[in-house]
C-alpha cells in the first residue's frame, strides 16, 4: 500500500539489523547495497577496505528511480539510509505528493559512543570513519520542521508488546453506526442515467453514508454529467470515493503526463469533457483513496466489518504488504475474481478483527462469471457491464441487513458485432481523436474531437469522422458527409491556420495535384445532411454531429418547407435517391439564425454541395448530373467557378484573392466571398479562404472577446480603423459591424 518508510539514524545505530529481525528486507531499498552494486569495495589510504562513495550521484539517482517505480505500483517501500538532515528527508516530499504516499520516519536513538563501539565490531568494509559518525550525530540533533516531525516514530516503540510496523501502518475501521443506511455504488463508466434514476427515487440525505467504488469514467458518453455529479458529491462529509483502475489515468494527468500516455478510452473521455470538467476531474483524482474500511452495528447490536476496494482482495484484512495496484486492479488475473472471493469468505470465518464477529468484502472491477451482487456469504460484487447496457449495482446496508439493487442502463453505445465487423468503423471506435454520440433509434455519430482539430492530431482514421452516422445494431452507415479536408494557405495566420496531417501550404500542393483542378465557390453557412433512416422509414436530417440539436432542427424545418414545394413525382425522386444508400450534403444559410461573415443576396437558403454514397469509397455524383438533378428538384446547386490547368495558373489566380485592403476603391464584391473548394482529377479536395474573409473573421473573433468583457490584444491597423469609425456602439454580429463601418466612413 502507499506507505513510504524512511529509516533515520547514524551509522551502526541498528537500522539494518532491525530490518532483518522484523523480516522487512523484501520491502527495502538500501543505499549501501546500491553502492556495492555500482562501485563495490575499495581500499583507503591506510589500507582498509571500505564501500566506495565514487558513484554516489548515480546511487542516489538510481535509488529515487527505484522508489518512484515502486510508488507507481503502490508498493510498501522502506528506504535504508541515514537521513540525518532535513534536506535528505525533503527529497522524498514531491514523490509522496505525486503518488499520494504517506511518509513515516522510524528514528533509531543510540548513544554516539555505543554506535562507534558497534561500528568497530563490523566487517572491515562496512566500517565508517569515527568523525563521520560524530558529524551525523550532530545533524541528527538539528530539529526537523513540524511537517516531518509529525511523521516520526521511535524504533523501540515497534514490536514486542507494542504494535508491529504493519499494525502501525494498517487502516483503521471507521465506525459508521450513527448513519441510517450505508450505500455503496459499483462501477459507473460514464453512465449517468442509472445513477440519476437512483437519486431521483432516493434523494441524497445527510443521514446516509455514500461510498463510490471507482471507475467513474471511460467507455460511455455521459462523462460530463458523471464528473459534475461526483464532484458535487465529494464536497460532502458523508461521501467516500475509491480509486478504480480507470482513475489511474487521472493520476497521470495530475502528475503532468500527457493524456496521450494513457489509453484510447481515456483520450476519448478527455476529449468529451469541457475545460471546466477537466479541472474538476483532476480534483476528483486527488480525492480518491484506495481502500475504505468501516464497522456498522446490525439489528442484533453486533458490529459487522466491511472492506471496500475496487478490485477485490483474497484476505479478510488490509495488509500494508498488498500493493495498491492489486487493491485497485484485483489480486491475481482478471479471471481470478471468483477464487479471490471464495478465499476471502473461507478465511473470514476464522478471523476476528477487534470485536467484529463478521467481516465482508465489497468490490467492483471484474465479473466475467456474471455472479450476483452477493457472490458468497461474505463478499459482494458491484460490477455488471454497465457501459454496454448492463446494470448499475448498488448495495444498501441497513440495521436489518442487505438490500442489493440493480438499475438497467439504457443510455449506452451498443457493442454490436455487426457494428465492429467493419474494420474502419472499429478503428473509429478505438481512435482517441474520435468521439461517439448515441442518438435515437440506436444510431451513433462519429466526429473528430477538439484535440484533433486544434492540435493537428488528424490521421487517416480521424479524417473520416466528420458527420458520419452508423446504425449501432447493423453496422450500416445511415448518413455521411465529406471526409475532413483542409485549408491551404500562402502564409499561416490566426484565422487561416488549419493544417492537413502534413504540410498544406499552397506550395506543398505542386507535386500532389493532378490537373485540371475544378474550383467551386465555398458558401458561408453550416453543413446539413439528408439521407434515409430505414429504421423509421423517413428522412434522416442532421447537422453538427446530431439529428436532435438546434441546428439539425433548424435545417429540418427549412427542408420540410422545401418539400412542400415539390410535386409528388419530385418528392418520390428525392426519396428514391436517398433510399438507394446516398447522402445529400448541403450548405445551410440563414443570416438571422446563424450569422456568418459573408452577406448573401438570399439571406435564407440551402445549397446542394454533393451527393455521396453511404460507404467509405467517397463516391460522389458528377457535377453535370448534380446540376440536372438540382433543376429537376428545385435545388440550388454549388457554383463551379473555373477549371485550372496547371500549378502556375493556380498560384496566380489564388494570389488575387490573397490580398485585401480595407479601403481599396477597386475592390469588387466578387472577392467578398469565403473562398473556394477545389477538387483535382484524382478527387483530392482542399479549400482556400480569401483575405477578405480572413480579415472580417479575425475582427468577428475580437468582437466576441469584447462582448465577454475581455480586452483584445494584437489589433491590426485596419481593424482599429473599423473600431474607431464605429465608436462605442455594440453590434450583434460582424455583418452589422462591417456595414456600419462603410456607412460611417462615407
Image: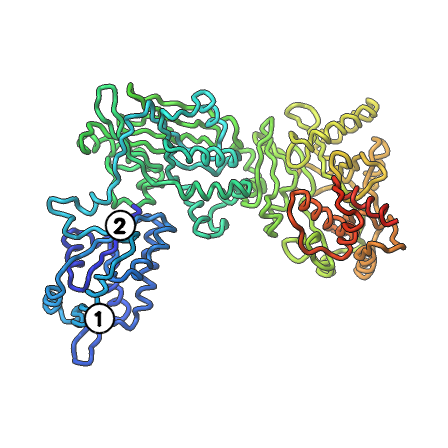
Instruction: Residue at 17%, 46% (x, y): give it.
Output: 164
Instruction: Residue at 24%, 70% (x, y): give it.
Output: 40
Q: Earlier in the sequence, mark 2 or mark 1?
A: 1
The residue under label 2 is 150
Display coloring:
rainbow
Quarter occupied by residue 36: bottom left
Asked whether 232 or 655 is in front, the reply is 232
The residue under label 1 is 51
Residue 334: percent from left, percent from top: 36, 39
Q: Can residue 367 be seen from the camera position used here?
A: no
Instruction: Count all numbered tags in the image, as a single digit.
Output: 2
Residue 723: percent from left, percent from top: 76, 50
**Residue 236: numbered disc:** none
Residue 150: percent from left, percent from top: 26, 50
Quarter occupied by residue 134: bottom left
> Is 443 displayed left or right of 149 in the figure?
right
> Helix or strand or loop: what does disc 1 sit on?
strand
Q: Residues within 10 Å of mark 1 (few under 14, many from 20)?
A: many
> Is 566 displayed left or right of 228 in the figure?
right
Relative to 86, say whether 193 is above or below. Answer: above
| Location of the N terminus (image quadrant) | top left
Asked whether 164 or 584 is in front, the reply is 164
**Nearest to viewer (mark 2 / mark 1):** 2
Instruction: Residue at 84%, 23% (x, y): give it.
Output: 567
Amino acid at each position: 500500500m502507499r506507505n513510504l518508510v524512511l529509516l533515520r539514524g547514524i551509522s551502526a545505530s541498528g537500522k539494518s539489523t532491525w530490518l532483518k529481525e522484523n523480516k522487512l528486507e523484501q520491502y527495502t531499498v538500501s543505499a549501501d547495497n546500491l553502492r556495492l552494486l555500482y562501485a563495490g569495495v575499495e581500499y583507503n589510504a591506510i589500507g582498509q577496505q571500505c564501500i566506495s562513495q565514487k558513484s554516489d550521484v548515480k546511487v542516489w539517482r538510481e535509488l529515487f528511480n527505484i522508489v518512484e517505480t515502486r510508488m507507481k505500483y503502490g508498493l510498501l517501500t522502506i528506504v535504508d539510509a541515514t537521513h540525518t538532515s532535513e534536506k535528505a528527508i525533503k527529497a522524498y516530499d514531491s514523490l509522496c505528493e505525486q503518488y499520494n504516499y504517506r511518509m513515516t520516519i522510524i528514528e533509531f536513538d543510540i548513544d554516539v559512543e555505543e554506535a562507534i563501539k558497534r561500528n568497530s565490531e563490523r566487517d572491515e568494509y562496512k566500517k565508517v570513519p569515527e568523525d563521520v559518525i560524530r558529524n551525523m550525530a550532530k545533524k541528527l540533533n538539528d530539529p526537523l520542521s513540524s511537517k516531518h516531525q509529525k511523521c516520526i516514530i521511535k524504533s523501540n516503540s515497534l514490536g514486542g508488546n507494542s504494535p508491529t510496523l504493519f499494525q502501525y501502518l494498517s487502516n483503521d475501521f471507521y465506525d459508521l453506526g450513527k448513519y441510517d443506511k450505508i450505500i455503496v455504488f459499483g462501477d459507473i463508466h460514464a453512465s449517468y442515467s442509472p445513477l440519476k434514476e437512483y437519486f431521483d427515487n432516493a434523494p441524497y440525505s445527510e443521514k446516509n453514508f455514500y461510498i463510490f467504488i471507482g471507475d467513474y469514467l471511460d467507455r460511455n458518453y455521459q462523462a460530463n454529467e458523471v464528473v459534475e455529479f461526483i464532484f458535487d458529491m465529494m464536497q460532502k462529509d458523508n461521501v467516500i470515493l475509491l480509486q478504480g483502475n480507470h482513475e489511474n489515468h487521472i493520476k497521470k494527468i495530475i502528475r503532468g503526463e500527457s493524456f496521450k500516455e494513457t489509453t484510447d478510452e481515456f483520450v476519448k473521455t478527455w476529449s468529451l469533457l469541457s475545460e471546466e470538467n477537466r479541472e474538476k476531474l483532476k480534483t476528483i483524482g486527488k480525492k480518491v483513496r484506495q481502500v475504505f474500511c468501516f464497522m456498522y452495528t446490525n439489528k442484533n447490536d453486533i458490529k459487522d466489518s466491511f472492506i471496500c476496494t475496487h478490485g477485490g482482495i483474497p484476505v479478510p484484512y488490509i495488509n500494508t504488504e498488498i500493493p495498491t495496484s492489486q487493491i485497485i486492479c484485483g489480486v491475481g488475473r482478471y479471471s481470478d475474481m471468483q477464487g479471490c472471493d471464495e478465499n476471502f469468505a473461507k478465511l473470514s470465518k476464522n478471523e476476528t478483527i477487534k470485536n467484529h464477529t463478521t467481516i465482508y468484502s465489497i468490490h467492483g472491477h471484474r465479473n466475467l462469471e456474471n455472479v450476483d451482487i452477493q457472490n458468497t456469504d461474505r463478499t459482494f460484487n458491484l460490477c455488471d457491464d454497465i457501459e454496454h447496457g448492463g446494470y448499475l449495482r448498488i448495495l444498501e446496508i441497513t440495521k436489518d441487513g442487505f438490500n442489493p439493487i440493480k438499475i438497467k442502463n439504457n443510455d449506452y453505445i451498443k457493442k454490436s458485432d455487426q457494428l465492429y465487423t467493419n474494420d474502419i468503423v472499429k478503428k473509429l471506435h478505438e481512435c482517441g481523436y474520435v468521439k461517439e454520440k448515441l442518438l435515437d433509434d440506436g444510431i451513433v455519430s462519429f466526429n473528430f474531437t477538439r484535440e484533433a482539430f486544434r492540435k493537428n492530431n488528424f490521421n487517416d482514421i480521424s479524417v473520416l469522422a466528420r458527420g458520419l452516422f452508423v446504425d449501432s445494431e447493423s453496422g450500416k452507415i445511415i448518413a455521411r458527409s465529406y471526409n475532413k479536408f483542409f485549408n491551404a494557405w500562402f502564409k499561416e495566420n490566426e484565422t487561416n491556420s488549419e493544417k492537413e496531417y502534413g504540410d498544406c501550404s499552397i506550395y506543398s500542393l505542386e507535386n500532389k495535384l493532378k490537373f485540371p483542378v475544378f474550383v467551386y465557390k465555398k458558401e458561408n453557412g453550416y453543413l446539413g445532411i439528408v439521407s434515409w433512416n430505414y429504421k423509421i422509414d423517413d428522412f434522416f436530417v442532421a447537422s453538427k454531429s446530431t439529428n436532435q440539436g438546434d441546428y439539425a432542427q433548424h435545417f429540418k424545418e427549412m427542408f420540410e418547407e422545401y418539400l412542400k414545394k415539390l410535386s409528388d413525382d419530385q418528392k418520390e425522386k428525392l426519396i428514391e435517391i436517398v433510399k438507394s444508400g446516398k447522402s445529400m450534403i448541403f450548405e445551410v444559410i440563414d443570416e438571422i439564425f446563424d450569422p456568418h461573415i459573408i452577406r448573401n443576396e438570399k439571406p435564407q437558403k440551402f445549397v446542394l454541395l454533393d451527393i455521396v454514397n453511404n460507404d467509405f469509397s467517397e463516391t460522389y455524383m458528377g457535377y453535370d448530373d448534380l446540376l440536372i438533378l438540382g433543376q429537376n428538384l428545385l435545388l440550388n446547386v454549388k457554383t463551379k467557378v473555373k477549371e485550372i490547368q496547371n500549378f502556375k495558373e493556380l498560384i496566380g489566380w489564388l494570389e488575387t484573392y490573397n490580398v485585401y485592403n480595407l479601403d481599396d476603391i477597386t475592390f469588387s464584391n466578387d472577392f467578398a466571398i469565403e473562398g473556394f473548394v477545389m477538387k483535382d482529377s484524382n478527387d483530392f479536395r482542399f479549400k482556400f479562404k480569401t483575405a477578405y474573409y480572413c480579415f472580417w473573421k479575425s475582427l468577428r473573433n475580437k468582437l466576441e472577446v469584447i462582448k465577454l468583457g475581455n480586452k483584445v490584444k494584437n489589433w491590426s491597423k485596419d481593424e482599429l480603423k473599423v473600431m474607431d469609425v464605429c465608436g462605442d456602439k455594440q453590434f450583434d454580429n460582424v455583418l452589422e459591424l462591417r456595414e456600419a463601418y462603410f456607412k460611417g466612413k462615407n
